[in-house]
Image: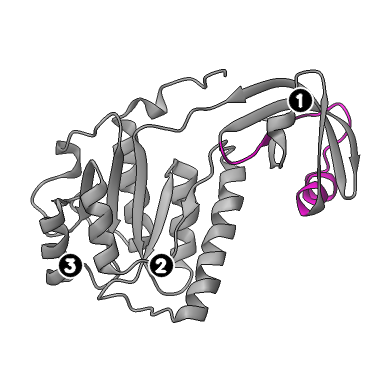
Amino acid sequence: MGVHTFVADGLDQAVVGGEVSFTGSEAHHAAQVVRVRAGEMVDLVDGAGRRITGDVTSAQRDRVDVRVQTIVLEPPPQPRLMVVQALAKSDRGERAVESLTEVGVDVIVPWSAAHSVVRWDAERARRGVDRWRSTAHAAAKQARRAHHPRILEVHSSDEIAALVSASTLALVLDEEASTPITVYDVPTSGDVLLIVGPEGGVSDREREMFASAGAVPARLGPTVLRTSTAGTVAAGIVLSSTSRWTDARMDP
């Protein structure tokens, strides 16, 4: 089993041989829930690529001290993988965010699609995005990621089209598409955008809008996947064709 990973601030000031500390809810989780003890090895990450490995010197209820043994700065992954995830009913949105984070997606964009069953007003959007961010934070720790995904604000279809225009490759997951996702060549840099529609599917207007912006349709396979799982499957296919799953971590 690998070492436990915790999120901490101020890691850019750390030096090998020195000590760093983290406090608050993260320390409480480490000391009271995970029950780390002096001498145990842990990883600390800041969510922006810095990873520190060290041994715990003290674990109290609201403070954990760690002696730094190694410092690694992981470069931003390339290509950057963005997933546009349509709003879904029940907890399917959070389930999608959790698995997308675990598989390695870099940016997740909540999308209020034309056929979305769920509608978020301003207050519900604020609470919904907060839940997605909390879910991503927990999943990133579970996955031991040094780079945590960004969860953007809710986007309209027009705003998604703008993201398509700015991307290097944009794929619209569509059960009616004739071209399988595995046919497309994934670039080695830039942004790869995956668009996951709602339970009701992508509307004709949205298909036309995204196509005009440069997106192409892609089919995952012979079965129809839920909106909460389609993006994760597609992300795995895309990432497996890049060096991101084969390159070792790099020292600074």
Does the image show residue 43?
no
Q: Nearer the viewer, residue 83 or 19?
A: 19
Q: Give the image's coloring scheme.
A: one colour
Spot occupied by residue 114 in the image (x, y as percentages of width and height): 25, 75
Q: Are marks 3 and 2 in contact (CB under 8 Å)?
A: no
The answer to which of marks 1 and 2 sits earlier in the sequence is 1
Which span is picked out in magenta? 25-48
In this figure, which residue is indicated by the disc labeled 2?
154
Quarter of the image containing the C terminus? top right
Tell me the distance, in whole angstroms, between the alpha carbons under discs 1 and 2.
38 Å
Tag of residue 206: 3
Classify mark 1: helix, strand or loop.
Answer: strand
Q: Nearer the viewer, residue 10 or 8?
A: 10
The crowd level at tag 1 (other Cα within 10 Å; few <14, some 14-19, many 20+) is many
Task: Name the image quarter holding residue 106.
Answer: top left
Spot occupied by residue 34 in the image (x, y as percentages of width and height): 78, 45
The kind of residue on which mark 3 rests is Glu
The answer to which of marks 3 and 2 sits earlier in the sequence is 2
The kind of residue on which mark 1 rests is Gly
Task: Name the image quarter holding residue 198.
Answer: bottom left
The kind of residue on which mark 2 rests is Val
Tag of residue 54: 1
For discs 1 and 2, the disc positioned in front in the rendered view: 2
